[in-house]
Image (cartoon, helix red, strand yellow):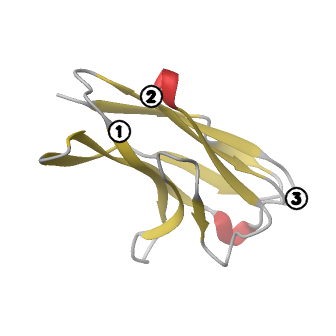
Amino acid sequence: QVQLVESGGGLVQPGGSLRLSCAASGIIYNIYDMSWHRQAPGKQRELVALITPGGSTNVADSVKGRFTISRDNAKNAVYLQMDSLKPEDTAVYYCNIDHGRPWAKRNVWGQGTQVTVSS
């Protein structure tokens, strides 16, 4: 069974930076798309950024130019560098991956890490 462990959340002042990490462990055959999502209180979970196995990225307009997603395939890890943070970026951030064999893909979520942007 594949599990995701996230780290790197915390409290930061507006304009500051944080780097989130997410590592997959367990029996891993292949990892396909990796992504970060967030959910603020009272709001639906939303996609923040996604990266394909080849490194192509898709970033939400609300964070474009401020957040960067990257991955290390050798470590089965995905990262989210968050710069110029704003109070509206406050949310629980979740990583998500598609993994498995081509004919039997599965999807798994991390436990979430809190990011709070406040002065």
Quadrant of the rendered structure where residue 64 is? bottom right
Front disc: 3 or 2:
2
**Residue 81 in view:** yes
Q: Earlier in the sequence, mark 3 or mark 2?
A: 3
Q: CA distance from mark 3 to mark 2?
A: 30 Å
Q: Quadrant of the C terminus?
A: bottom right
Q: Check whether the beta carbons of the residues at disc 2 and disc 1 lie within 8 A of each other.
A: yes
Q: Check whether the beta carbons of the residues at disc 3 and disc 2 lie within 8 A of each other.
A: no
Bin the neighbour count of mark 3 within 10 Å (Cα to Cα): few under 14, some 14-19, many 20 and up: some
**Residue 30, percent across and down?**
30, 34
Look at label 2 and name its amino acid: Asn
Please tell me the numbered disc located at residue 31: 1
Residue furthest out toward the left: 104
Q: Earlier in the sequence, mark 2 or mark 1?
A: 1
Front one among 58 and 3:
58
Quadrant of the rendered structure where residue 65 is? bottom right
Residue that numbered label 3 is attached to: 15
Q: Quadrant of the N terminus?
A: top left
Please tell me the numbered disc located at residue 112: none
Front disc: 3 or 1:
1
Look at label 3 and name its amino acid: Gly
Q: Secondary structure at mark 1?
A: strand
Front one among 45 and 51:
51
